[in-house]
Amino acid sequence: MARALMTIGAILFIAGAVIWAVSKLGLPLGKLPGDITWETANVKMHFPLATMLVVSAVLTVILNIIARIGRK
């Protein structure tokens, strides 16, 4: 149980560091064309569809490269 919690904590730490670094670089993630924002008087909803697709594609490429290097 302790090992699982430490692994989850490390993953969350790395994800937070990446998000922080991306925000410092000035990349417009979350504000790309294709991200949907819907506002009414009491409700504001944001669906970052284009951002999710970009992040997914980048992570897929990175993880495939890591997997290929690991197989050699």
Image: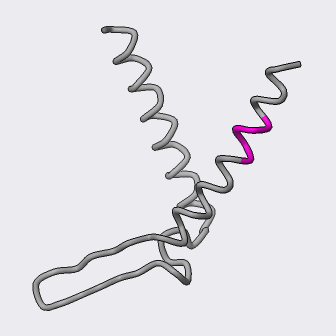
Q: In the image, 6: left or right of 21?
A: left
Magenta residues: mostly which secondary structure? helix
Q: Magenta stretch?
A: 61-65
Q: Residue furthest left?
A: 42
Indicate the position of residue 55 as horizontal and vertical percent values. Answer: 59, 57
Up the image or down, 2 lies above or below 48; here it is above
Residue drawn at x 70%, y 38% as measured from the top left: 63
Q: Is residue 47 above or below residue 22?
A: below
The x, y position of residue 69, in whole percent, is 84, 26
Viewer-side residue, 7 vs 65: 65
Q: How many marks?
A: 0
Q: Position of residue 40 (x, y in %)?
A: 18, 90
Colouring mode (rainbow / by chain / secondary structure / one colour): one colour
Is 1 situated above or below 58? above
Is residue 1 rendered magenta in the image? no
Residue most extreme to the bottom:
41
Front-most of residues 26 and 42: 42
Q: In the displayed structure, does residue 49 sit left or right of residue 55?
A: left
The N terminus sits in image quarter: top left
- State whether residue 1 is above or below residue 17: above
The residue furthest right is: 72
Could you tell me which quadrant the C terminus lies in? Answer: top right
> Residue 47 at what x, y percent from top left?
38, 72
Q: Residue, x 51% and y 36% (percent of image)?
A: 14
The residue sitting at 57% across, 52% down in the picture is 21
